[in-house]
């Protein structure tokens, strides 16, 4: 299995800093059209969770590589841009990116996130995997949708999704070679069996990191975990 380096929540060096800075300015790419009300209603039916546990984040079958729930009142996850603070609720980020290095190959990244403020022009809250240059991969909650973005390349797969301030969501991002997939569900409801968005991205061989992101928005990250993805998956 090809090995990749995921610098989760913090990427050293000028090249990586430039990539993070570009994201904070606004992730680039032509915007997909906003979903209609009918499409949103249809998506609610399509996203009904499968039977299973209603606990927040369920563990993946692979080896646990990293986990943080911020209950100690401090974190090694370093702010790279915007404003970040460890609070009793979790790691609160406003209009920025935070990161920490960890090594992984194919993997699943899980997070539990409360959306605090999406009143900006185009707020984006979620996870972003960084490569060299500008080919960053993003899994994002946005106004009215759940979206994959290959930064500086194009917007990729998305579904209509009702994103509301004050609501807590669970999210998983699966990286298998160049294929990136994502799922999202309301905290306290069963996790959907299937990934809801999936696409093949340009390049995985030089992947350098993955970050918590909140450009043009505000969110609280309650829990983050990274699991090694077994080859058979």
Image (cartoon, rainbow, N blue to C red):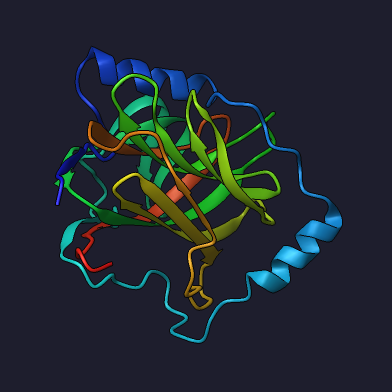
**Observer-nearest of 118 and 159:** 159
- Give the position of the C terminus as an image quadrant: bottom left
Count the marks: how many? 0
Residue 118, located in which quarter of the rendered image? top right
**Observer-nearest of 53 and 217:** 53
The residue that appears at 24% across and 53% down in the rendered structure is 106
Is residue 179 visible to the viewer in this orientation of the structure?
yes
Question: Please, is residue 74 above or below residue 225 in the view?
Answer: above
Residue 33, located in which quarter of the rendered image? top right
Question: Please, is residue 111 above or below residue 219 in the view?
Answer: below
Question: Please, is residue 157 above or below residue 37 in the view?
Answer: above
Question: Please, is residue 84 above or below residue 161 in the view?
Answer: above
Image-based side of 67 in relation to 214, left or right: left
The residue that appears at 60% across and 58% down in the rendered structure is 167
* Residue 78 rendering spot, x and y as whole percentages: 26, 33
Is residue 224 visible to the viewer in this orientation of the structure?
no
The residue that appears at 42% across and 55% down in the rendered structure is 89
Image-based side of 93 in relation to 38, left or right: left
* Residue 232 rendering spot, x and y as whole percentages: 23, 68
**Observer-nearest of 72 and 150:** 150
Residue 40, located in which quarter of the rendered image? bottom right
* Residue 210 rendering spot, x and y as whole percentages: 31, 39
* Residue 73 rendering spot, x and y as whole percentages: 27, 49
Image-based side of 141 in relation to 73, left or right: right
């Amino acid at each position: 299995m090809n090995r990749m380096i995921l610098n989760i929540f913090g990427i050293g060096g000028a090249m990586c800093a430039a990539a993070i800075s570009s994201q904070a300015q606004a992730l680039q790419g032509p915007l997909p059209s906003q979903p209609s009300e009918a499409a949103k209603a249809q998506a609610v039916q399509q996203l009904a969770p499968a039977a299973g546990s209603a606990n927040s984040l369920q563990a993946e079958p692979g080896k646990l590589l990293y986990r943080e729930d911020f209950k100690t009142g401090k974190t090694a996850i370093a702010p790279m841009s915007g404003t970040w603070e460890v609070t009793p609720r979790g790691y609160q980020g406003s209009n920025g990116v935070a990161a920490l290095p960890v090594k992984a190959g194919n993997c699943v990244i899980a997070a539990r996130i409360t959306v605090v403020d999406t009143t900006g022009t185009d707020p984006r809250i979620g996870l972003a995997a960084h490569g060299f240059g500008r080919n960053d991969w993003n899994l994002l909650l946005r106004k009215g949708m759940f979206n994959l973005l290959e930064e500086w390349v194009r917007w990729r797969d998305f579904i209509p999704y009702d994103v509301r301030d004050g609501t807590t969501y669970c999210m998983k991002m699966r990286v298998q070679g160049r294929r990136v997939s994502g799922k999202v569900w309301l905290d306290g409801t069963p996790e959907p069996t299937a990934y809801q968005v999936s696409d093949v991205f340009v390049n995985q061989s030089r992947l350098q990191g993955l970050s918590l992101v909140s450009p043009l928005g505000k969110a609280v990250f309650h829990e983050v975990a990274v699991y090694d993805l077994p080859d058979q998956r």
